[in-house]
Amino acid sequence: AVASCTACGLCRQRQQSVFGRGSNQPLWLVVGDGPSTQDEAAATPLSGDTGALLENMLQASGRAQQVYVTNLVKCRAQDEQGQPRAPTPQEVAACRPFLQRQFTLLQPRLTLALGKTAALALRGPQAQASALRGNVHQAFGKPMVATWHPAILLGRPLEKRQVWADLCLARSNDGNNAGNNAGNMYSSSGSNEAARGA
Ligand code: SF4
């Protein structure tokens, strides 16, 4: 079980594991890197302001009720100073069976990767070196689209235009033609700068 897992070193600093939330018949599996301190306290992934922004993104996509949200790793990662950090490839690999199990049980049609760490881990090292954003990749044998992590997006609001493009790409590749008439909440002017977060 995740709660008692000791497969990687993140178990040593775990207050509680953070498994996932959302529909049990999702169109999209939404995957971030790992739980924050706030997520751990709430035992829910992408909580607080980050979660509110993710909800806005998903509402704009028209898929808000058809997603399951989780992370590459189920336990919070921190550095020696106690600051949040991205999970290492070894930690991601150790936790992969839980993510694979979630995918197998939920059978989403598409994975939406939040941020560079999640996108690279899901796409895999053997994938062609195409840009993470703006292309449809494969994860678990199904389409995978990368976008900004909402925690990064909180400090970079101009990139919301890029997020809208990513969400449109995801919508057009999840095999669901219904509900594709959602409004564009992200149509304000934005930067063309290449995304650093994805
Ligand atoms: Fe186990 Fe995953 Fe937590 Fe590591 S992050 S201890 S593999 S549940």
Image (tube, helix red, strand yellow):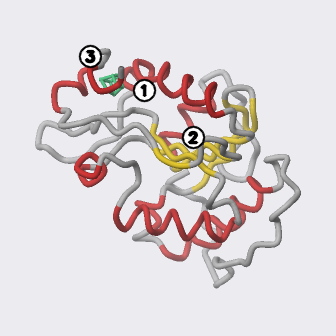
Q: Give residue 6's mark.
A: 3
Callout 2: 10 Å neighbours few (<14), some, many (20+)? many
Rendered location of residue 72, percent (x, y): 46, 34
Rendered location of residue 16, percent (x, y): 23, 36
Quick check: 61 above or below 137? below
Please tell me which residue lies in front, 3 or 71: 3
* Amino acid at dot 3: Thr
The answer to whether the residue labelled 1 contacts the one labelled 2, judged by CB atoms less than 8 Å apart, is no
Q: Give residue 92's mark.
A: 1
Who comes first in sequence, dot 3 or dot 1? Answer: 3
Callout 3: 10 Å neighbours few (<14), some, many (20+)? few
Label 2 element class: helix
The residue drawn where x is 43% and y is 41% is: 33
Relative horizontal placement of residue 182, taking residue 175 as reference (left or right): left
Please tell me which residue lies in front, 77 or 124: 77
Figure quadrant of residue 77? top left
* Amino acid at dot 2: Ala
* Amino acid at dot 1: Val
Residue position marked by numbered label 2 in the rendering? 119
- What is the distance, in whole Å, between disc 3 and disc 1 at their CAs? 13 Å
Whereabouts is ligand 1, in terms of quadrant? top left
Which is more foreground, mark 2 or mark 3?
Answer: 3
